[in-house]
């Protein structure tokens, strides 16, 4: 099996799983309980939170534990929108956001909120001058992903944060889901940030929303204080401990892992550029972990299924997207509907071997010829 869909999810690191098992078996109390067993579970959460804060250099920021990055995005956007509706109902976003951002904003439009989409440059990056023009007195939130899930574009988060520093009534939310553990992002000027464990070799079912201490949110889940007032429910201390472990491990060799993945990415691109009907959608501003291509003349699902016959697994869009739709991100970047309908995402990891890439390239050639694209 050759797995090239790491942006959808990653295999669980055994050390992370061991942390979860140990906490589950040895610390059985409810962290909200006031007896000794509850205090022990609560202490484990405190230790995990401190470790995450140190790893991400979170000064004056709170960690809210959630079930997924989608929940974190929902809590950040709805939480701000509902809490600060008295200030305004204008939100700014980009065309390259995950569905858990786009669909929340579409929902808010039905409640009277106004959503503006910032222009992008020819390379797909945010047009900072247009962003400045869009900010108004009633703008309460800007939500931009650090890295787009389909094309891998790395947005200028630090520069956007510096611009928004001049607008204290406007908050800045960043979806870190595809960047965490792959590239370093400075969060000093970010008000809220979302990420999940299963993208960094952790367990599914645990994620986080980072929030500056002075920001209030309207909760999605009510029911009393848990680890925070902003998300009720019994704290999942084994999952929280495993999240801290996954984050630490993902950051340990981030630079060397990046260079290794870059080498694999370059090898794939050099080979695929030999085919007349293959177009590279990811560009020089995309991280090497995500390589989006289009194969003109064949539906994306057909080519994906052809590769699967060789036990190779890629995706057509982000895992949460509607499978029947074309890639809106590719269409926005290329203005080519055929490319958007035929796009495939190859996502790499430091776990990917050169032998796997060689096999993928050999199989790609066979699929290309089998589908009469030669």
Image: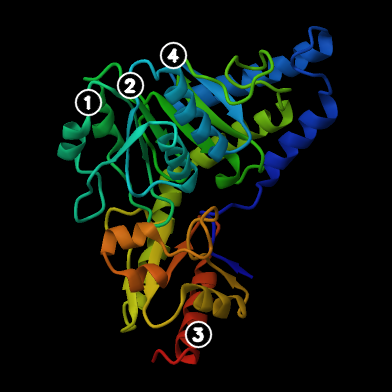
Q: Which mark is residue 136?
A: 1
CA–CA distance between discs 2 and 3? Answer: 53 Å
Which residue is drawn at the image coordinates 23% and 48% (left, top)?
120
CA–CA distance between discs 4 and 1? Answer: 27 Å
Residue linked to disc 2: 88
Of the two numbered discs 4 and 2 on the same chain, state the one appearing first in sequence. Answer: 4
Q: Which mark is residue 367?
A: 3
Which residue is drawn at the image coordinates 36% and 79% (left, top)?
296
Q: In the rendered image, is residue 194 in sight?
A: yes
Q: Are marks 3 and 1 in contact (CB under 8 Å)?
A: no
Mark 4 closeness class: few <14, some 14–19, many ≥20 residues within 10 Å: few
Quadrant in the picture for residue 159? top left
- State the SS at label 2: loop
Q: Are marks 1 and 2 in contact (CB under 8 Å)?
A: yes
Of the two numbered discs 2 and 3 on the same chain, state the one appearing first in sequence. Answer: 2
Residue linked to disc 4: 60
CA–CA distance between discs 3 and 1? Answer: 51 Å
Q: Quadrant of the C terminus?
A: bottom left
Quadrant in the picture for residue 16? top right
Asked if 213 appears above or below 107 in the picture, the reply is above
CA–CA distance between discs 1 and 2? Answer: 9 Å
Front in this rendered view, residue 82 or 196: 82
Q: Which mark is residue 374?
A: none
């Amino acid at each position: 099996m050759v797995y090239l869909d790491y942006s959808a999810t990653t295999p669980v690191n055994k050390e992370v799983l061991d942390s979860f098992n140990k906490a589950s078996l040895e610390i059985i109390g409810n962290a909200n309980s006031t007896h000794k067993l509850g205090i022990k579970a609560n202490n484990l959460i405190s230790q995990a939170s401190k470790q995450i804060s140190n790893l991400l250099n979170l000064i004056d920021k709170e960690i809210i534990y959630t079930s997924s990055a989608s929940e974190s995005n929902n809590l950040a956007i709805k939480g701000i929108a509902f809490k600060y509706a008295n200030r305004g109902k204008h939100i700014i976003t980009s065309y390259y956001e995950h569905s858990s951002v786009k669909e929340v904003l579409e929902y808010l439009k039905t409640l009277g909120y106004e959503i503006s989409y910032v222009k992008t440059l020819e390379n797909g990056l945010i047009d900072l001058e247009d962003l400045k023009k869009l900010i108004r007195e009633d703008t309460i939130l800007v939500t931009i992903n650090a890295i787009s899930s389909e094309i891998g574009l790395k947005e200028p988060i630090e520069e956007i944060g510096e611009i928004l520093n001049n607008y204290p009534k406007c908050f800045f939310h960043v979806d870190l889901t595809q960047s965490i553990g792959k590239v370093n992002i400075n969060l000093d000027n970010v008000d809220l940030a979302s990420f999940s464990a299963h993208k960094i070799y952790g367990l599914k079912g645990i994620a986080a929303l980072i929030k500056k201490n002075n920001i209030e949110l309207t909760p999605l889940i009510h029911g009393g204080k848990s680890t925070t007032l902003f998300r009720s429910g019994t704290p999942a201390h084994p999952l929280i401990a495993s999240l801290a472990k996954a984050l630490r491990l993902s950051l340990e060799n981030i630079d060397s892992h990046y260079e290794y993945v870059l080498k694999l990415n370059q090898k794939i691109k050099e080979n695929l550029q030999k085919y007349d009907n293959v177009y590279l959608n990811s560009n020089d501003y995309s991280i090497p972990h995500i390589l989006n291509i289009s194969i003109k003349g064949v539906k994306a699902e057909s080519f994906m299924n052809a590769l699967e016959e060789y036990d190779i697994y890629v995706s057509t869009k982000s895992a949460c997207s509607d499978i029947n739709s074309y890639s809106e991100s590719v269409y926005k970047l290329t203005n080519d509907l055929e490319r958007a309908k035929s796009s495939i995402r190859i996502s790499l990891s430091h776990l990917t071997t050169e032998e796997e890439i060689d096999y993928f390239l050999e199989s790609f050639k066979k699929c290309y010829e089998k589908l009469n694209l030669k």
